[in-house]
Amino acid sequence: MTSHRPVVLITGGSRGIGAAVAQLAAERGYDVAITYRAEHGAAEQVLAACRRAGAKAVACRGDVAVEADVIRLFDEAEEDLGPISHVVNNAGITGKSGKLAQTSAETIQACMDINVLGALWVAREAARRLPKSPGARTIVNISSVAATLGSPNEYVWYAASKGAIDSLTLGMAKELAPEGIRVNAVSPGMTKTEIHERSTQDAGRLERLRPNIPLGRIGEPEEIAEAVLFLMSDAAAYITGANIPVSGGR
Ligand code: NDP
């Protein structure tokens, strides 16, 4: 029996925000392909949750920074689930925090390779494939409020990588509008995920930063996922090229 559920591919869907998007998408009637890089069992848990919600779900392993991997990830997902209609361009890293002058070439290179080049390979593959898919089609790029705040003294290179995502969103939205494909971004503020735990080597940092968040708390991955699912839905049919901050007002 063929599935009539739309198919969403979510890069970096094994943990954090991507995993929350995958689970919410499954609950809202999508079949789900998640991609991940490292074998640590997290992808299996996300798949199980998606299947419990009634979705067909597959996990495809590959590095978004590698062009050939990205093409293969789309091929594998389409082989298992059929044409992809929605792409959530989410995989990303920060690297060790610090002032730019003291930051290693490896940290900057990895951030650019994954957050910028990786997002571009995924975006290009989406631009190639989505025009052939039936029904509503959308791309949601995961940026960061860092793109506009600049993250001085902590993550200037990361902020710059997310600035690229904002430009990518604007350009793609206009380029793909004639095909009926909507392209938007969600810019999370500080959200409770492992990226965040890994980047907060300094245990007191969260408490110091909390007063900068008008709503006075860190966000939950599920709260980011709600904005992503809204942009994917027909309720957002007239929205393209938008960038929604989900940051507690930061
Ligand atoms: P996590 O570290 O919790 O999860 C990152 C996900 O990306 C994992 O699934 C990981 O896979 C995957 N990933 C990382 N590198 C690669 C790669 N090279 N190829 C394929 N997959 C990869 O991060 P978050 O959920 O916090 O972040 C998701 C997105 O949200 C990122 O783009 C991040 O910049 C953005 N964001 C996050 C904020 C936050 O405070 N959490 C704030 C603003 C933006 P694996 O499990 O295999 O490692």
Image (cartoon, grey):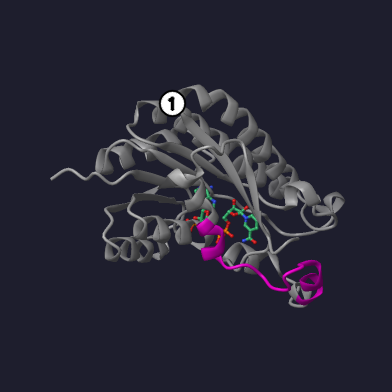
* Residue 67 x %, y %: 49, 33
Which segment did they paint magenta? 207-226
The image quadrant where one finds the C terminus is bottom right
Crowd class of label 1 (few under 14; some 14 to 19; many from 20; radius 10 Å): few
Q: Residue, x 35% and y 60% (percent of image)?
A: 27
Q: Is residue 93 left or right of residue 67?
A: right
Residue at (85%, 57%) from the top-left corner?
Answer: 153
The answer to whether residue 211 is magenta is yes
Residue under numbered circle 1: 128
Type of the residue with mark 1: Arg
Closer-to-camera residue (177/90): 177
Return the residue nearer the eye: 197 or 124.
124
On screen, residue 250 versus residue 81, left or right, reads right
Q: Is residue 228 visible?
A: yes
The quadrant of the rendering that contains the N terminus is top left
Task: Identify the residue shown where x is 59% and y is 26%.
Answer: 174
